[in-house]
């Protein structure tokens, strides 16, 4: 089954490639690798799940935010790769979680992105990952995700 068909089966769809909000591009292809810019949880131009973990949002809400971030990152990959079916391997996921000083469940939040990628790509969706707590993200976003993927 094609990746975008799997998305539809999950009740999800791939958004348009995110438009940069400053002087950068959403994704860069170098040889057979694609590096995405950090993506936040924009849905149809609206930022979802604003706030800090440990204060404003639950882990479950931020998990959903991470999933949206991963979808936006995949849209950025598609913009330079032509198709999600050209992805051979999800190599690395880096996630930033807007957190209070005492919040330590960043890995649970980033599972929103990781579990989606595993479901879409199977074994090729298993990846190395960093889950970092930060004290602020652009526009007050709760989560930001970036990907490195290898193309076929």
Image (cartoon, rainbow, N blue to C red):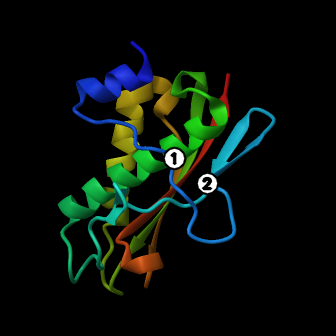
Q: In the displayed structure, would residue 143 be above or below residue 82?
A: below
- Numbered disc 1: secondary structure: loop
> Is 6 left, or right, of 117 in this rendering?
left
Q: Quadrant of residue 25?
A: bottom right
In this image, 11 relative to 127: left or right? left
For mark 1, what is the residue? 17
Q: Residue at x 58, y 30 (%)?
A: 89
Name the secondary structure under disc 2. Answer: loop
Farthest residue to the right: give it. Answer: 31
- Identified at 56% across, 69% down, the residue is 21
Asked which quadrant contains residue 51, the reply is bottom left
Q: Earlier in the sequence, mark 1 or mark 2?
A: 1
Q: Which mark is residue 34?
A: none
User: Residue 19 in the image: x percent, y percent?
Assistant: 54, 57
Where does residue 104 sit, x and y in percent of width and height? 33, 73
**Image quadrant occupied by the C terminus:** top right
Question: Which residue reaches farthest top?
Answer: 1
Residue at numbered disc 2: 26
- The structure residue drawn at horizontal position 20% and vertical position 80%, both measured from the top left corner, is 56
Instruction: Report the Cα–Cα distance between label 1 and label 2.
Output: 8 Å
Determine the residue positioned at 60% across, 39% down: 79
**Residue 122 seen in this snapshot:** no
- Quick one: 150 or 139, which is closer to the camera? 139
Report x, y in % for residue 133: 43, 74
Do callouts 1 and 2 mark residues in contact (Cβ within 8 Å)? yes
120 on left or right of 59: right
């Amino acid at each position: 089954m094609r990746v975008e068909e799997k998305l539809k089966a999950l009740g999800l769809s791939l958004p348009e490639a995110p438009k940069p909000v400053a002087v950068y591009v959403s994704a860069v292809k170098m040889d057979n690798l694609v590096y995405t810019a950090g993506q936040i949880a924009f849905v149809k131009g609206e930022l979802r799940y604003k706030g800090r973990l440990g204060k404003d949002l639950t882990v479950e809400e931020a998990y959903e935010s991470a999933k949206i971030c991963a979808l936006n990152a995949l849209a950025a990959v598609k913009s330079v790769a032509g198709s999600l079916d050209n992805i051979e391997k999800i190599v690395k996921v880096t996630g930033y979680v807007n957190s209070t000083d005492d919040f330590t469940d960043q890995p649970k939040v980033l599972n929103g992105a990781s579990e989606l990628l595993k479901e879409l790509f199977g074994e090729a969706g298993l990846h190395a990952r960093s889950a970092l707590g930060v004290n602020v993200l652009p526009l007050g976003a709760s989560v930001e995700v970036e990907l490195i993927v290898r193309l076929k």
